[in-house]
Image (spheres, helix red, strand yellow):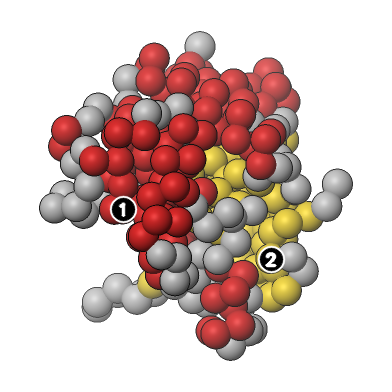
Amino acid sequence: MKDIITVNNLTKYFKAYGKADTAAVNNVSFTLHEGETLALVGESGSGKSTIARLLTGLIKATDGNIRIYDKDICKMKRNKALELYGQIQMVFQNPAESFNPRKTLGYGIGEPLRNRGYNSAAIANKVAELLEMCGLPAELAFKYPHQVSGGQCQRAAIARALAVEPKILICDEATSSLDVTVQKQIIELLDKLRKSKNLSIIFICHNLALVQQFCNRVVVLYDGQIVEQGTPDEIINNPQAEYTKLLVDSIL
């Protein structure tokens, strides 16, 4: 199976005023295979979101390397790395906050296309296509974020992420603010898109039960370090690390 992302010994320290530097991510290594969904699981402060920011180039690593399509983005000049970052899109926890409240959802979904020089007619057609792809009616493009439900807004956020036809989606707690029924619907949508678009997905979550529904592999993080890796069934049925056992106990 082809590796899309390879992370080796990734470390990120943050400076703390008057204190020793803090390791938010400490010597982390994992791979993301083509067409799979990889879960990063752990409590708040475990390093999950920091890893997402490192993968998307929002912050720089202190040590280690990140290879995307076998190219080390940690050593590339920014203009070259930007081409690879274009293959990665984020879906965030609070979709309404990721859209401009003064602009329609259609405007937000079309923004990546405007940045690439698409004309208005082409953008309108593409936005309608993206909305339909994500299970939404085309007329939702004329709604504002506060006028739709959380589930609809998250579907619109996924549509926006797909606008530039990325190969990788990073979903950072993308279902945690939704109720259980809507969570299931968003999971089903992501899995459908993964298969139809041959996407590779990193699914950041703290809920092992949710991960078990559609992730191929799981990386368990605690205090910035990986404590365990495996398939969902391996992790849940035979946890090895004490922290993993606590996570499993919380869903049983």
Residue 168 coordinates in the image, percent (x, y):
61, 52
Residue type indicated by callout 1 = Gly
Compare residues 26 and 213 and report the one nearer the observer: 213
Residue 121 at x, y = what percent?
40, 56
* Residue 33 in the figure: left or right of residue 148: right
Q: Amino acid under label 2?
A: Ile
Q: Nearer the viewer, residue 90 or 26?
A: 90
Q: Quadrant of residue 228?
A: top right
| Mark 2 lies on residue | 68
Marks 1 and 2, Cα distance to the nearest angstrom?
27 Å
Marks 2 and 1: in contact by CB < 8 Å? Answer: no
The image shows residue 9 at horizontal and vertical percentages of 66, 66
Residue at 52% x, 28% y is 189
| Above or below for 187 versus 26 | above
Q: Secondary structure at mark 2?
A: strand
Q: Residue furthest bottom?
A: 77
Location of residue 232 (image quadrant): top right
Label for residue 24? none
Q: Nearer the viewer, residue 29 or 148?
A: 148
- Say whether disc 1 or disc 2 marks the residue closer to the N-terminus: 2
Please tell me the numbered disc located at residue 108: 1
The crowding category of the residue bearing disc 2, from other C-alpha atoms within 10 Å (few below 14, some 14 to 19, many at least 20), is many
